[in-house]
């Protein structure tokens, strides 16, 4: 009898200990657990992510609509899709042999990753602000006779208003085959006064990756692993480099569709993960609000994030977009995150319709 009482007491103590080690995250963050190295009590807490799953109907989504969308996806080049609502994965779609562990090249969704890393570098004091002239990092441009070069700031690179002739036109292949991608961009002619004209260019983002490396002594990928990816469990992330050893920050990040959702969730939560502020709320808000209104097109621009509205109610949204149909959509008011990976070379209109359908299913 005595041994049974002692065993019961030990079990109760164990339950109290385990309960004390857990932490409840914000309602839209899923389940988070804290682990600490007992041999190193000064070590920063590590929050281990656990996905939560739910039925669409339990989170205000029409399951029949989502099933119908799956049938439509079958007729398209969409490879994978995940819908995250109210802290739960409520819908997944995978084509052929793809699954949640499959690695996808993000193409220009990489730009939004690089934007996050620039924000962290500013938060930590590696970079002073978005108003810093890029000549501080590329002093060779001070020798140019074109004074507009000297006016270009990090903010202009972030908003694609640098004035550089775009690398994403007929020069794309020439740029990617050049010996030095940074020099190629810096030697492009200035076609407009910085800050006045939107001209989408992966070259702008590559300069940001180069600046990040100059400012921190680490590649964008290395910096990201230390201050972003590892901290929130984005374990799948990889990145290509140019011949100079600079991360391809505008086109070269790869990750799983689940890690795409994590990035969207981090931004949805204002840069907070568990109890750790990974990116300042100020940066998240600045980079996902309208920074430059385009004269045409279906979306405007923040700091390497696109912004527009969806649904009849015109819900504000921000999103990352990459060639071939790679997307991370965040609609804060609906607590909704949608990720797509695709092999699609057509119009974006198809994705706008899919998001509108999902939003309608949320009403």
Image: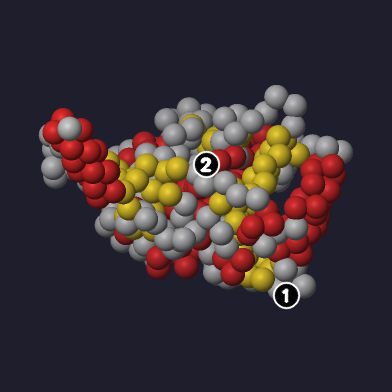
Residue shown at the point (71%, 44%) measured from the top left: 325
SS for dot 1: loop
Mark 1 touching mark 2, by CB under 8 A? no
Per the image, the residue denoted by label 2 is 259
Gap in Å between the C-alphas at discs 1 and 2?
29 Å
Q: Secondary structure at mark 2?
A: helix
Image quarter of residue 282: bottom left
In this view, the residue in front, 316 or 241, is 316
Q: Quadrant of the N terminus?
A: top left
Position in image of residue 142 (x %, y %): 39, 55
Circle 2 packing at 10 Å, graded few (<14), some (14-19), many (20+), is many
Label 1 packing within 10 angstroms: few (<14), some (14-19), many (20+): few
Left or right of residue 318: residue 129:
left
The answer, for residue 306, to whether it is visible in the render is no
Q: Nearer the viewer, residue 134 or 262?
A: 262
Query: Is the residue 270 above or below the residue 259 in the image?
Result: below
Q: Earlier in the sequence, mark 1 or mark 2?
A: 2
The single residue placed furthest to the bottom in the displayed view is: 313
Q: Is residue 37 left or right of residue 297?
A: left
Q: Is residue 279 above or below residue 262?
A: below
Residue at 67% from the left image edge and 46% from the top image edge = 91
Residue 62 placement (x, y as % from top left): 75, 58
Residue at figure coordinates x 32%, y 57% from the top left: 275
Could you tell whether 241 is left or right of 230 in the image? right
Residue 313 is tagged as 1
Q: In this view of the protein, can residue 93 be seen by the observer?
A: yes
């Amino acid at each position: 009898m005595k041994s049974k009482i002692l065993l019961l007491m030990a079990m109760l103590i164990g339950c109290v200990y385990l309960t004390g080690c857990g932490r409840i995250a914000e309602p839209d963050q899923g389940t988070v657990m804290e682990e600490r190295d007992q041999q190193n009590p000064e070590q920063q807490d590590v929050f281990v992510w656990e996905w939560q799953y739910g039925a669409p109907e339990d989170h205000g989504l029409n399951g029949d609509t989502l099933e119908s969308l799956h049938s439509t996806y079958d007729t398209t080049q969409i490879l994978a899709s995940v819908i995250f609502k109210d802290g739960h994965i409520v819908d997944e779609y995978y084509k052929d042999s793809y699954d949640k562990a499959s690695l996808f090249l993000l193409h220009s969704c990489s730009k939004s990753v690089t934007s996050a890393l620039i924000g962290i570098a500013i938060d930590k004091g590696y970079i002073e602000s978005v108003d810093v002239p890029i000549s501080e990092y590329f002093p060779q441009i001070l020798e140019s006779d074109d004074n507009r070069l000297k006016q270009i700031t990090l903010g202009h690179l972030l908003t694609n208003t640098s004035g550089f002739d775009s690398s994403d036109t007929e020069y794309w292949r020439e740029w990617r085959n050049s010996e030095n991608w940074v020099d190629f961009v810096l030697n492009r002619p200035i076609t407009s006064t910085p800050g006045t004209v939107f001209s989408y260019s992966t070259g702008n983002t590559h300069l940001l990756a180069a600046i990040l490396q100059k400012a921190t002594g680490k590649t964008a990928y290395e910096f990201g692993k230390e201050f972003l990816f590892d901290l929130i469990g984005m374990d799948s992330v990889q990145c290509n480099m140019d011949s100079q050893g600079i991360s391809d920050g505008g086109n070269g990040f790869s990750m799983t569709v689940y890690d795409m959702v994590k990035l969207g969730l981090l931004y949805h939560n204002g840069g907070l993960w568990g109890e750790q502020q990974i990116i300042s709320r100020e940066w998240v808000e600045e980079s996902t609000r309208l920074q430059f209104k385009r004269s045409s097109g279906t979306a405007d621009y923040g700091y390497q994030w696109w912004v527009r509205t969806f649904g009849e109610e015109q819900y504000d949204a921000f999103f990352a977009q990459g060639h071939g149909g790679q997307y991370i959509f965040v609609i804060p008011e609906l607590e909704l995150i949608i990720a797509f990976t695709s092999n699609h070379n057509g119009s974006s209109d198809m994705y706008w319709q899919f998001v509108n359908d999902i939003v309608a299913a949320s009403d």
